[in-house]
């Protein structure tokens, strides 16, 4: 569902003058609460990085609201066989540095990101690519390692195209001052941990689904404290915030001239449990993991802390993703059963660590529920990159994840990431890896659904995680700004305008 937001006139005198000035400057000021580790979309998993990536870069194809794939940098494509994709590139596209898009750019970018030694943070988005070759000045052939039913999803979401020669070494090494793309906005300046400034690309090509940007400048500031964000919003220092806690959104929504919208998203919240050799011995017992599931009232947290647009889930996937099924073992809120399972397992006085990077109020609710059944929790609240590193090193017992699956409508963006042997897998279950590996190369849609269903059922039966709920996003903005919210959580700056 898409909701339109047209912010009302009559904003308080405190901020109306500033808002009018920003409209006159045709500038949008946006605040985000987590530090962007890199403006390069291949070297961050943060939602802000995905937002910047979609506005500054283009992919070969785009995914429409109806789920159909549309031309973007490629105008035509044909599967020669199950592992061979031929694409024709669009003429007349230029990068922000003035160079013209051609086949070499696609070949170099996709070869770089599909090479594990170069270390992009989510190798699964490109790991399916075996080779990329130039078949003409504006044509390329992508060879997959095996049949890859989700290939078009990857090509339409995360595989942004850079100019040839941009990368000079692993880990995103480059000699170019600022990242370069072809998108409707270019990066004008970037201060790590500070402001990221985007400027409208006046040479952006016609015929793109992203064409028509009208706002000249987008200023993105990192403001970790939500109270400071709201104070800046009310004083006119910023125009748009996202990710408000439900209670603050409710309060702000009652104020004159401020509009608050709850946007539906495909982001799921779940607790992942470390059952590897570094995890606590207790978590290796399925009864303890089941007890943790029974101890947490997911419905109460969803309704009372998260609010409108949140849906309790039983499987670790978003219902709209291909291959997702919620028809798995479900654990009702039952503290007495949780205590009985712990006693049966001979566990008492258990204390575990919980890593989290957002929604601290949800973390605190989880801690309280676990305390009620006798499980102590040490909360480790950290920056996203630090949590990711700790999780991949298996250094924490439980992780509170909020996964948006890179906005990909395919279970392959979620299941193998956390349960199929990828770096974020904290269980190492070979049966799950085999199921999800097979699902990732099976072209028969019904067979893929069966494989994913079997995998999600095993995750639930083994209680490797606590599936929680979908996470809506609350947005608040200032007078005169028009924009739309989307389930993929992508702020499309090219669609926004001042009235």
Image (cartoon, grey):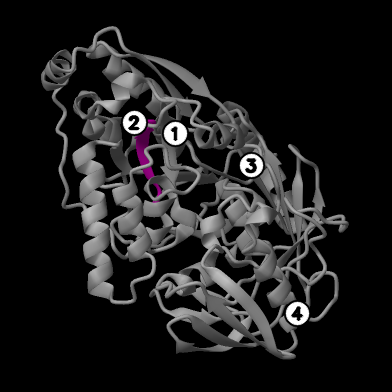
Identify the residue shown where x is 16% and y is 28%: 333
Mark 1 element type: loop
Q: Is residue 406 left or right of residue 160?
A: left
Compared across the picture, whether 185 is left or right of 367 comes to right
Boundaries of the magenta span: 263-275
| Of callouts 1 and 4, the N-terminal one | 4
Q: Can the viewer see residue 497 in this picture? A: no
Q: Which residue is mark 3?
A: 31
Q: Residues within 10 Å of mark 4 (few under 14, many from 20)?
A: some
- In this rendering, the answer to whether 32 lies above or below 450 is above
Residue 407, above or below 339? below
Dot 1 or dot 2, earlier in sequence: 1
- Magenta span contains residue 264: yes
Find residue 203 and report its horizontal and vertical position in percent.
78, 77
Query: Would residue 246 be seen by someone viewing this image from the given angle?
Result: yes
- Residue pointed to by mark 1: 245
């Amino acid at each position: 569902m898409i909701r339109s937001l047209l912010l009302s006139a009559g904003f308080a005198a405190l901020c109306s003058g500033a808002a009018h000035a920003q409209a006159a400057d045709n500038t949008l000021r946006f605040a985000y609460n987590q530090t962007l580790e890199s403006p390069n979309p291949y070297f961050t998993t943060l939602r802000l990085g995905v937002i910047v990536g979609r506005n500054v870069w283009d992919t070969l194809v785009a995914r429409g609201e109806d789920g159909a794939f549309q031309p973007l940098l490629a105008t035509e494509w044909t599967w020669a066989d199950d592992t061979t994709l031929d694409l024709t590139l669009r003429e007349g596209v230029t990068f922000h540095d003035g160079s013209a898009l051609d086949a070499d750019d696609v070949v170099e970018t996709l070869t770089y990101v599909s090479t594990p030694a170069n270390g992009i943070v989510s190798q699964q988005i490109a790991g399916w690519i075996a080779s990329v070759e130039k078949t003409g000045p504006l044509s390329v052939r992508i060879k997959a390692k095996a049949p890859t039913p989700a290939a078009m999803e990857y090509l339409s979401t995360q595989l942004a195209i850079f100019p040839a020669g941009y990368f000079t070494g692993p880990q995103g090494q480059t000699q170019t001052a600022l990242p370069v793309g072809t998108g409707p906005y270019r990066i004008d300046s970037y201060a790590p941990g500070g402001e990221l400034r985007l400027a409208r690309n006046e040479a952006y090509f016609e015929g793109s689904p992203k064409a028509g940007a009208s706002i000249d400048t987008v200023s993105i500031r990192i403001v970790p404290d939500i109270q400071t964000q709201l104070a800046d919003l009310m004083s006119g220092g910023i125009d748009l915030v996202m990710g408000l806690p439900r209670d603050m959104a409710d309060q702000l929504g009652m104020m004159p001239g401020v509009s608050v919208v709850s946007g539906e998203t495909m982001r799921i919240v779940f607790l992942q449990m470390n059952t590897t050799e570094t995890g606590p011995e207790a978590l290796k017992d399925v009864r303890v993991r089941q007890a943790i599931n029974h101890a947490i009232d997911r419905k109460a947290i969803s309704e009372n802390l998260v609010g409108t647009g949140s849906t309790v889930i039983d499987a670790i996937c978003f219902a709209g993703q291909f291959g997702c099924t919620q028809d798995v073992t479900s654990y009702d809120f039952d503290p007495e059963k949780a205590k009985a399972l712990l006693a049966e397992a001979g566990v008492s006085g258990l204390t575990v660590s919980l890593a989290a990077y957002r929604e601290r109020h949800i973390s605190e609710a989880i801690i309280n529920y676990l305390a009620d059944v006798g499980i102590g929790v040490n909360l480790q609240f950290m920056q996203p990159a630090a949590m990711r590193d700790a999780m991949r090193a298996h250094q924490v017992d439980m992780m509170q994840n909020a996964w948006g699956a890179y906005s990909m409508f395919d279970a392959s963006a979620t299941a193998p990431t956390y349960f199929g042997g990828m770096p974020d897998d904290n269980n190492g279950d070979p049966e799950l890896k085999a199921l999800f590996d097979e699902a990732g190369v099976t072209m028969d849609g019904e067979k893929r659904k069966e494989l994913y269903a079997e995998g999600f059922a095993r995750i639930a039966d083994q209680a490797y995680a606590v599936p929680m709920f979908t996470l809506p996003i609350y947005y608040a903005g200032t007078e005169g700004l028009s924009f739309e919210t989307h389930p993929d959580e992508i702020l499309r700056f090219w669609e926004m305008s001042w009235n």
